[in-house]
Amino acid sequence: MSTPSKLYEGKAKIVYATENLQEYLTYFKDDATAFNALKKGTIMGKGEINCTISSALLNYLGSKGIKTHFLAQKSEREMLVKAVQIIPLEVVVRNIAAGSLCKQTTLLEGQKLPFPLVEFYLKNDDLGDPLLTVDRLNIMNIATVEQINQLKDNALKINQYLIEFFGSCDITLVDFKLEFGLDFEGNLLLADEISPDTCRLWDNLEQDIEKRVLDKDRFRRDLGKVESAYQQVQKRVLTQIEKLKNT
Ligand code: 5GP
């Protein structure tokens, strides 16, 4: 078999072409970065965990009618996906104030938001992924007004499904980042991954504000026990998926 050709290497994943023009193979790495790659490290086993969690969650969202790029988990670290052209936006949904929202506003960490906040950030490392306004989005021609509305509607629906799903795992979904892409026919698909790298997840069974963190903030904030937090999320997600299969 010929060596697969690498199309793109990001901070956490590598995307390969396949024999089928309409499908890509994504490989999940253990590399971890934070603060626009100023902080670099390795989270042992992260690739396998994130590939497995993402596959389970994308498949679950698919079963709820959300259009995603997920086709199959091919191995512990490999996911077969529909080929899409990624829209260079990070669509962030927040239910509870944390992270950059607290740095940039007077909201305090842990404050429940009165409604889910959907934000668009430009996916551009050189500019530090700046927060965009709808008018800036329009002027930059990144997405049409219709696509922006579609992105927001999708993000809110996904939020509701994920809040419910993680809730049944005794996990609070604080916030998360989504990426979307357009397939060959121009359909908008949820792409990328949904994992402890891209979500803030707090353990409902733990009161301590540091111990409850089950996501990449453990790496960002040097809280330790990063691997075991990721393993805990994987265990609870897979247990819940199994439960759903049997109901
Ligand atoms: P914040 O804007 O507070 O830093 O991030 C909000 C949410 O989006 C968090 O769950 C965070 O993990 C996710 N997020 C934002 N930007 C990125 C990014 O560039 N990479 C990853 N993996 N997650 C991000």
Image (spheres, rainbow, N blue to C red):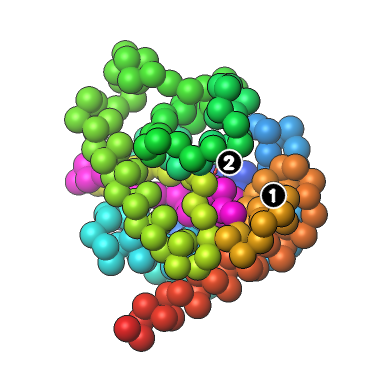
Q: Quadrant of residue 180?
A: top left
Residue 146 pos. (x, y %): 19, 30
Question: Is disc 1 surrounded by few (<14), some (14 to 19) or many (20+) residues within 10 Å?
Answer: few
Which residue is depicted at the point 47% across and 61% down? 166
Left or right: residue 232 versus residue 198 is right
In the figure, 27 relative to 75: above or below? above
Q: x and y percent of residue 26 in the render?
A: 49, 57
Q: Is residue 187 left or right of residue 30?
A: left
Gap in Å between the C-alphas at discs 1 and 2?
9 Å
Tag 1: residue type? Ile
Q: Earlier in the sequence, mark 1 or mark 2?
A: 2
Which residues lie in the magenta part?
Answer: 185-202
Ligand 1 within 8 Å of disc 1? The answer is no
Q: What residue sits right under mark 2 in the picture? A: 110
Q: Is residue 79 magenta?
A: no
- Give the amino acid type for the residue marked by disc 2 in the picture: Gly
| Residue where numbered disc 1 is placed | 209
Q: Residue at x 30, y 38 (%)?
A: 151
Q: Residue 221 at x, y = what percent? A: 75, 42
Q: Residue 21, can we see it? A: no
- Total number of numbered discs in the rendering: 2
Q: Quadrant of the C terminus?
A: bottom left
SS state under label 1: loop
Q: Is residue 192 magenta?
A: yes
Q: Are marks 1 and 2 in contact (CB under 8 Å)?
A: yes
Residue at (43% x, 81% y) in the render: 242
